[in-house]
Image: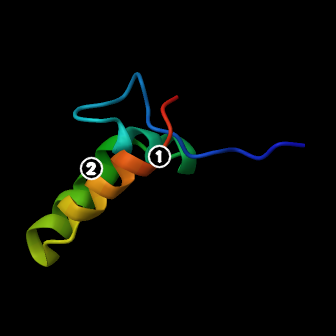
Amino acid sequence: MQGKKMRKSSTDKKICGVCGGIAEYFGFDSIWVRLVWAILTLFYGTGILIYIICALIMPDE
């Protein structure tokens, strides 16, 4: 049996589909993932770097 894999979303994407893919994987609405990502970027500055790394590492859908 093959497990569920995290992939970039091809239907729910604004830039690269990372937030949409994470939302699909965990079963959340993508707006919540984007909101958390924005908060991480504004308060800690790590959101942009993590997004770029995820965009490079996560496979396409």
Q: Which mark is residue 34?
A: 2
Q: Is residue 56 left or right of residue 14?
A: right
Total numbered labels placed on residues in the image: 2
Extreme residue in the bottom direction: 44
Amino acid tagged 2: Arg
Residue under the image location 34 percent in, 52 percent down: 33
Extreme residue in the left direction: 42
Amino acid tagged 1: Met
Q: Quadrant of residue 50?
A: bottom left
State how far apart marks 2 and 1 are (Cα). 17 Å
Q: Is residue 49 left or right of residue 45?
A: right
Which residue has dot 1 on it? Answer: 58
Indicate the position of residue 8 as horizontal and vertical percent values: 44, 37
Q: Residues within 10 Å of mark 1 (few under 14, many from 20)?
A: some
Q: Secondary structure at mark 2?
A: helix
Q: Of callouts 2 and 1, which one flags the residue occurring earlier in the amino acid sequence? A: 2
Q: Residues within 10 Å of mark 2 (few under 14, many from 20)?
A: some
Q: Nearer the viewer, mark 2 or mark 1?
A: 1
Extreme residue in the right direction: 1
Indicate the position of residue 5 as horizontal and vertical percent values: 64, 45
Residue under the image location 82 percent in, 43 percent down: 2
Q: Secondary structure at mark 1?
A: loop
Indicate the position of residue 3 as horizontal and vertical percent values: 77, 47
Residue under the image location 52 percent in, 28 percent down: 61
Indicate the position of residue 32 as horizontal and vertical percent values: 32, 51
